[in-house]
Structures are given as structure tokens and as C-alpha cells.
Amino acid sequence: MAEESGQEKTEQPTAKRLSDARKKGDIPRSRELNTTVLLLVAALGGLVFGGPVARAMMELMRASFTLDRQAISDPALMIEHLTAMLLDAALSIGGFLGLLILAALLTPIAMGGWNFSGQSLQPKGSRINPLSGLKRMFSLNALVELGKALGKFLVVGSVAVLVLLGDRVQLSSLAKQTVDLAMVHAVDILLWSFLLMSAAMILITLLDVPYQLYSYNKKLMMTLQEIKDEMKNTEGKPEVKGRIRRMQMEMARNRMMKDVPEADVVITNPTHYAVAVKYDQSRGNAPFVVAKGADFVALKIREIADEHEVPILSAPALARALYHAAEVGDEVPVGLYKSVAQVLAYVYQLQRYRQHLETDRPRPPAEEEIEIPAELRVDPE
């Protein structure tokens, strides 16, 4: 019954629904993905930059505790010395920090992309509502988060135990080494252990990303009624759609009328239909329809043609056939090639006569001389 009434959320979210959610700052996100990538990048960055950074820090420590009498007695020199040490420290760890910042900026692209929405920063009463808070605490999402926390504890904890057991011999040997060598060796063990424990987070991420996508899609699922309402709001009211359609038709008609002066001939009904035809060898091997119309539009086409001295020929059967068989911009149907060729031949002869290239005025083809195939013939209304 719920499905029949359209109240069951069974439909996939529409593009508008997804777009509206994104504008509100609601996009799919996996904190585990971001955390895992940052941990792995930090571990790999530590392996790459760890040695140089460690040596630079050791030099800074030596320089910081090696002061002459003048530096100790002059506060200005102490401040200058401190500033130089801080600058050197920042430069030594700059590459490592830059790598972390780059990872933090690029990771969101993998899921949801970058998005900034002021609506997500607006205060909402539901965030401080105790009842809403209790509902979130005992929701499915809270249960999933608890499961992820336990999973991370078990997986990362197990890997940590295995790593410590594997490194117990090396850890015990640190006491027998010199301070400098022991520090380098300890940092190396620490970084590799950190990398292995970070890699353990990949398992949690592989489970969390599909779940977050599924949860996000399920949250935006729509009922049939919501889809109908959205379509109604998107498309607008019938009277608005009708007005838009009329405006579009008017614009198309105006564009069509501008092309009438370029036509070779206007074939008429003579009062009900008018079709303007042009032959352009650079466009194709067949004439095409420049404009067409019935009743008032046909009258307007004839007026424009008369103003620009475009020949007008009365051929009712051909005009009806062209009007119903071809749209504006279409080539003349193959079955009407011969008929239109007869008309164009007359037009070209008329042009030569007007240019005084021929002495005898050509005779327009008679209605019975213009052959119209039976399948394209349209009876008068």
C-alpha cells in the first residue's frame, strides 16, 4: 500500500536532487579514506624526508645549545639566533609539510570532489536539540561508526602487535649502539612500523567507501510523488509552458522570415499555403525549404517575397505537398525533385528575361504539367 501511494522511497535521486544536496554542502564523504591517505602519505614522506630532517634537527640542536658569551649577554643576539633557528627548522620540514597539505587537498577529489557551501555553516536547531542527538546516537549510522571504531582497533592493534614482535630483536639491540646510530635506527624502525600500521587502515577504507556511497544514495532516494512534484516545479505550470512555446515559435518564425528574401521562388496554394524554396549548389545537390507557412504566415511570406522581388508561383498541389513533406531547412523530398526542377527552370528563365538576356517572356508551368507522386499528393482541405 505504501508503494501504491507513492510514499515509499523507491526511486533513485534525480540530477536536480543531487545538485540541490551539493549546494547545501551534502556530498558523499569518507573520513576513513581521508585519514588513510594522510597516514600513508605521512609515512612515505617520513621515509623520504626522515633522514634529512633528522640530521637537520640534530644540527639545529647542536647550534641551539652552542652559544658564546656575547650571545648570552645580548638579548638582541639571542632573538636573532632564535629566529634563525626557527627559519631553518621550517625549511627543513617544509617538503614534508607541503606533501601533507597536497594530499589533504587532493584526497577529497576521489570522493565527492571539492565543495564549499555557506548553507552548511548556518546554525540549525536540530544540532542542539537533545532529542535529535539521542536519535543520532541510536541510529544505524552510529552503529556503523561504532563497528568501524572496533574494526580499526582490532585491525590496527593486531598489526601493531605483529610489528612489535617482528622488531623485538632490533629494538633490544638499540641499547648496544651509540646515541647517534641508535637514534637513526630507532627513527627507521618507527617509520616502517608507522607505514605498516597505516596500511592496515586500507582494509577499513575499502569497506567504508562503498558504504558511504550507498548510505548517501539511500538518504537521497525519492518517492514517486517527490519526482512528480519536482518535474512539475522544473517544467513549470501549463500556462507558463504554453507561453514559452509560443515565444519559441515566434522567434523561429522571425528567423524564418529573414531568409525569405534569399529564396529563389515562393510556391503558393495560392492563399492557404506558401513555401519558399532555394537551390544552393554549395550546400547540396537538392533544393531546400527556406520558409513555409499557412494562412496568416503564408500571407506574410508572400508579402516579404513581393517586397524583395522574389518570384511567386501559384502551384496548389505542389505547395501542399511541400508544406506537408518537408520542414524548414530540409531538402526537397526525392519524389518532388522533378516538380521543383520545373519551377526552378521557369524562375531561371524569368531572371534571364528580366536581365534582357531573352526576348520572350517564359510561360509558367501549368498546374497539370507539374507531376506530383501519389504518395506525396495532399488533397485540398
Image: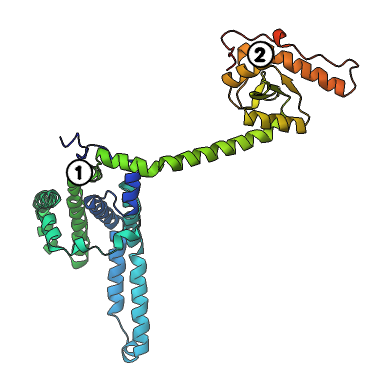
Tell me where residue 101 appears, x and y as whole percent: 33, 59
Q: Is residue 284 above or below residue 203?
A: above
Q: Nearer the viewer, residue 193 or 242?
A: 242
Q: Residue at x 76, y 30 (%)?
A: 306
Q: Secondary structure at mark 1?
A: helix
Tell me where residue 143 appears, x and y as whole percent: 10, 50
Q: Nearer the viewer, residue 64 or 99?
A: 99
Tell me where residue 110 appears, x and y as whole percent: 32, 46
In-image side of 229 versus 271 (left or right): left
In-image side of 293 versus 125 (left or right): right
- Residues under numbered marks 1 and 2 in contact, where contact means CB atoms less than 8 Å apart: no
Q: Is residue 96 visible?
A: no
Q: Is residue 381 visible?
A: yes
Q: Which image quadrant: the N terminus?
A: top left
Q: Nearer the viewer, residue 227 or 323?
A: 323
Marker disc for residue 337 = 2
Q: Residue at x 25, y 45 (%)?
A: 220
Tell me where residue 25 appears, x and y as whole percent: 31, 55
Q: Which image quadrant: the C terminus?
A: top right
Residue bearing the label numbered 1: 211
Between tags 1 and 2, which lies in front?
2
Q: Secondary structure at mark 2?
A: helix
